Amino acid sequence: MERESGEWGIEKGIEGREDREEEPGDRHAEQQMSIHSDAQAQNPAPNPVSPNALPSHSRTDAKLRVSPSTSHSPLPISYSLTSAEATVMALGIHVDTGSLTYDHATVRDAAALTWLMAQGASLQAIAEYVEPGLSPTMQDLLTVALDELQTETVHGYQVSWVLLSVEEYIPGLSNLASRLLSLTEADVLLLAARYAVGGGEERLTVIGRSHSRGEWRFDQSHEGIDLGELFEPFGGGGHPRAAALTTRGVDPEQTLAELLDQLRSQIPHPPVARELMSSPVRTIRPDTTIQEAQRILLRYGHSGLSVVDEEGGLVGIISRRDLDIALHHGFSHARVKGYMTTNLKTIAPETPLTEIESLMMTYDIGRLPVLDQGELVGIVTRTDVLRQLHREKAIGEQGAGKGKEERGGRREERGERSKHWRDYCVLPGVVRQVLRDRLAPTLWDVLMAAAKQAEERGWQLYLVGGAVRDLFLSNLSAFESGSDESSALFIPDIDLVVDGFHRAADQAAGVELARALQQQYPSVRLQVHGRFQTAALTWHNDPNLNSLWIDIATARTEFYPYPAANPEVEASSIRQDLYRRDFTINAMAIRLTAPRTGEVLDFFGGLLDLQEGYVRVLHANSFIEDPTRIYRAVRFAVRLGFQIDPQTEGYIRHAIASGVYHRIQSEMEKFPALQTRLKQELRYILEAPYWFQAIRLLDNLGAICCIHSDLQLTDRLWWQLRLVDRWLKQFDTTHQVEHWLTLLEVLLTNLTVGDRVKVAENLQLPSDSIQRLQNLDAIHQHLTAHLPECDRPSQIYQLLNSYDLPTLTLLAVIVPRPIRRQIWQYLTRLAFVKPPLNGNDLKALGYQPGRQFKPMLEALLAATLDGKVHDRSEAEKFLGDRFPLQS
């Protein structure tokens, strides 16, 4: 569309300011823009990069109140613009000057554009609206170029090129290349022009252009086509989407052919079905009943099932909707062969993403089976495709954002940078670099050795769980602060998952990989957990790896036969393995194996929850199946300073209100999630410095009842917990006592003796702890009856000396205050009193060793406690009077 210069020029931009309602800063800005001619005279020196260099042809004195200038010096203006205003003004300059290519363009125009870019002018908007016109010569060349343009498809991408012959160099070839790219469907275009210069020397100019989508449509394991790097060996340069070169004394056809060869080699293979599919595929037989098929869907959380014959050949697919309809009409015992879809569209492992997209759109298919020589090896769903497209789009946007930041020369503020963090941190190249920079070199070597062993066996290896979470959290902090340097991240506990790729991995794949690593690291200790087929490699005080734990498991899915049970486990895919985990922030993975090392798997929005500070569960029944996840949610929320997602909190309260935990405890003999697994979570919480806040949050959620339905955190119980915590810190500075266990015992003391012992046994607490809880009331009664009668320190000592510190601290919170003071007196003073003489001293005094030494020393200690004996001489006199030597 033809535009007048005034429409997009500075006049229009300033009028836009006057049309809107005046804001507090507007009057000041207008005063800053008022320039007088005497000010010009004081600053005559030109400055091509000055922010005051407004183009003379676009200046309107009436609007800016700028006096006419008699020189070409820049005007001494000092003010700032919004991004929108700067964009509109820059558009005017581009249109008026043909993007600085017209003869009347001046240095002042270029300087003004520089300043407007610094003010935040949007180059994307300018590129969209500026349409530089073509001269008649250029229009003729465009026609020739369109006629002679050659195109080929490389890995799903259209590469176009043309070689033009002209009599002399023609300015504006870059505009011609851009126009040619816009008129074709090419992803990458090379426009070459051969021409002669003075003396008949032939030269070649090549202009390269690519669409912005060309960066992100490539496989994310690569950085995409970089035209600047492509042209550099030939003497040219530029940036990833635009580059140029001019050379002489070369064969134009050969040079263009070499450029094309290099371009083809840089175009990576697009994603294929093998890299997108889920595997192994859950299958059923044609004779499976509708009811059984529905049960399988429920168990594994699938939306459909593949139907195979006895030889394993695919014969149909049945969806959840098909099953629901059959059940609705009462055909639960019918066979699936009567309801399955048999007219199938299938793909091969090497089918590219573009073809998969086309099949899904053309036939409205939500899933495509992947067959390898007739064998069903995987399935690609619509979700797989959308996730891949989003991942590629994020990479392209990050590349564009990086270029914009470099051109603008200004770093984004923290808030702006954090908006792009998720797109930035999923770039495989970035993740690889973060792993190398943040992990100790020796640990990185171990991970790469494990990845190599997995690759040799045709497996994929992923870093999963807390290590990924903590890595991204530290990266987010550095990203928001704009820091380029990060301290080393110590991760002593590493979780690795082996994925069997297109076949069902053997249950022992993790064990096999661990044994292979043990061959490389002979000093490592290997532990195999047979039931779940996991293996643990442990280094203890290793000179290179210090103390390190690496757990290796085969990707698996799990099913809970009833609430709070141990899950039933089967080998599965990495996606199902992540889905079985507790929270989104713990359900991410980083691929360690080539060729896509650094690929991030985030199927459930974990990165977003990390950024927003939420603990969010993966599915609604998570807390019904495993109540310990309530305690983990609280632990992570308090530890990380996060909030529990509102919907997740609703799931917690619903699970507790349902009474399922009380019912399970009363009806089932075994409920591991409320036994050993709950004890472990309680230990994690009570050992942490934030235990008080965690218990508060558990109380707020009503989750203490998971320990026992009658347990309530009253004000007195809060006081008891704080008192025991203070006493343990006072009297057990060397941590000879397990503080977490004593705090847990305090919680249980508020139950009846029978209930507290039952809970302690369910939690499988140590035997001395169970005995202490069982005898506590009896000890309480005994001390309450006898301590008030004690009028001498030795009597207090004699009553309390037989009890250990955990027992005394428990007693301190349940006995009356006078007795608590006596316990305090014992722990602070009496327990440390020693008699002036010992057994050796008695022998030196002439006493014969024997059983009489014990009552002698006890009597001497009592006299010392009561203040009757103070030193050695008094002790000898005391023994001489009470236990005279036999002649």
Image: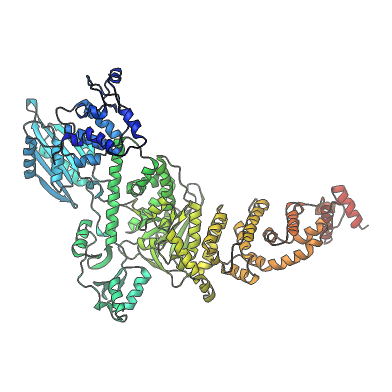
Which quadrant does the N terminus fall into?
A: top left
Which image quadrant is residue 557 in?
bottom left
What residue lies at 38% left-to-right and 53% top-to-bottom?
A: 608
Q: List x then y, in percent, for residue 44.
A: 27, 18
- Which residue is more in the foreground, 336 or 787? 787
Which image quadrant is residue 736 in?
bottom right
Asked if residue 582 shows in the view, the reply is: no
Furthest toward the right, the residue is: 887
What residue lies at 46% left-to-right and 68% top-to-bottom?
A: 624
Q: List x then y, in percent, for residue 35.
A: 29, 24
Q: Is residue 126 left or right of residue 476?
A: left
What residue lies at 75% left-to-right and 66% top-to-bottom?
A: 782
Above or below, 17 against 295 in this view is above
Q: List x then y, in percent, for residue 577.
A: 38, 62
Q: Is residue 710 left or right of residue 14?
A: right
Q: List x then y, in percent, for residue 318.
A: 27, 72
Above or below, 435 against 551 in this view is above
Q: What colouring does the structure picture have?
A: rainbow
Q: How many labels does the image show?
A: 0
Which image quadrant is residue 745 in?
bottom right
Asked if residue 173 shows in the view, the reply is: yes
Which quadrant does the C terminus fall into?
A: bottom right
Above or below, 459 against 544 in this view is below
- Which residue is more in the foreground, 37 or 296? 37
